[in-house]
């Protein structure tokens, strides 16, 4: 009997912190995982035959040069098309990673509380070229995408032009603009943030609007796996009052 009562109390406690999906507007669409998109979902520069996004960690940063962790391992976030030379691709990834791990690289962040940094790198092959290359800045990627006019391109661009603490969740086409909804739950599960950013087809951001930035009352911080927190990105906390979307 005590076990049943304890179980009921635990269930009430657990569901008091239930997290739900944001309420989407009419015609607003939820992004899929980046890895689920194919070459057909992009309208890349015609010279590009293969494009990938990989993510890897460095050794703890001491204020000097960044160093890759050994052995070099990475996670593939996106892979579209066919590599021109798959036999050399593995060596090329490590070679290019060593080149781009600089202080001024645009797509990196520190993984607190650790001292190491995580880098995301966009590699590609072009026609009649056996060399894998990497984009070193956002402008090069924007030129490869040409106009931002597909869901997949918008998601990739939103990710690489925003803080890693914000997850692109959904988008709404508004005339010549895209309104992208970003959503994030903190790793301790006790804080949520939601905002809109407005993008033009050329990738420029015309403005943003904070929807909510709020701590969950009476939440007991727990160090959770970021994969589990952000997998579905459910963000509305039960029994909490937030600014209503208009």
Image (tube, rainbow, N blue to C red):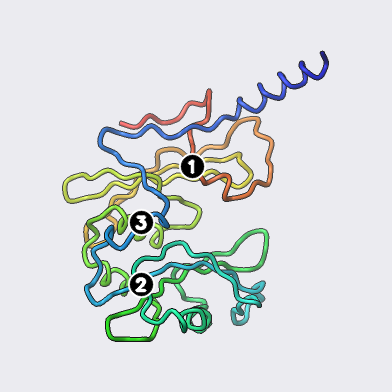
Q: Is residue 10 above or below residue 127?
A: above
Name which of mark 3 and mark 2 comes first in the sequence.
Answer: 3
Q: In x, y percent, where is residue 137?
A: 37, 74
What quarter of the picture does the C terminus occupy?
Answer: top left
Please state the total of marks drawn on the protein image: 3
Q: In x, y percent, where is residue 85?
A: 40, 82
Nearest the viewer among 205 and 203 is 203
For disc 1, the marked residue is 233
Residue 82 got which mark? 2
Residue at the far top: name it: 1
- Is 204 positioned to the left or the right of 183 in the image? left
Name the residue: 65% across, 74% down.
Answer: 59
Callout 2 secondary element: loop
Nearest the viewer among 73 and 14 is 73
Callout 1 secondary element: loop
Q: In x, y percent, where is residue 54?
A: 48, 68
Residue at the far right: name it: 2
For disc 3, the marked residue is 37
Name which of mark 1 and mark 2 comes first in the sequence.
Answer: 2
């Amino acid at each position: 009997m005590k076990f049943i009562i304890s179980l009921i109390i635990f269930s009430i406690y657990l569901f008091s912190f239930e997290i739900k999906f944001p309420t989407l507007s009419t015609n607003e669409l939820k992004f899929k995982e980046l890895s689920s998109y194919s070459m057909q979902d992009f309208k890349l520069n015609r010279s590009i035959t293969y494009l990938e996004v990989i993510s890897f960690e460095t050794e703890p940063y001491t204020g000097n040069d960044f160093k890759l962790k050994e052995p070099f391992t990475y996670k593939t976030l996106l892979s579209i098309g066919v590599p021109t030379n798959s036999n050399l691709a593995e060596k090329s990834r490590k070679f290019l990673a060593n080149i781009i791990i600089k202080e001024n690289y645009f797509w990196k962040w520190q993984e607190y509380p650790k001292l190491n940094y995580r880098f995301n790198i966009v590699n590609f092959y072009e026609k009649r070229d056996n060399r894998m290359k990497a984009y070193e800045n956002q402008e090069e990627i924007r030129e490869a995408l040409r106009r931002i006019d597909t869901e997949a391109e918008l998601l990739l661009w939103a990710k690489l032009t925003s803080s890693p603490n914000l997850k692109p969740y959904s988008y709404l086409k508004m005339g010549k603009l895209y309104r992208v909804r970003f959503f994030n739950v903190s790793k301790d599960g006790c804080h949520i943030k939601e905002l809109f950013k407005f993008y033009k087809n050329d990738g420029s951001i015309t403005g943003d609007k904070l929807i909510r930035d709020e701590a969950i009352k009476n939440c007991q911080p727990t160090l959770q796996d970021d994969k589990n927190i952000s997998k579905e990105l459910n963000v509305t906390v039960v029994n909490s009052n937030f600014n209503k979307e208009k």
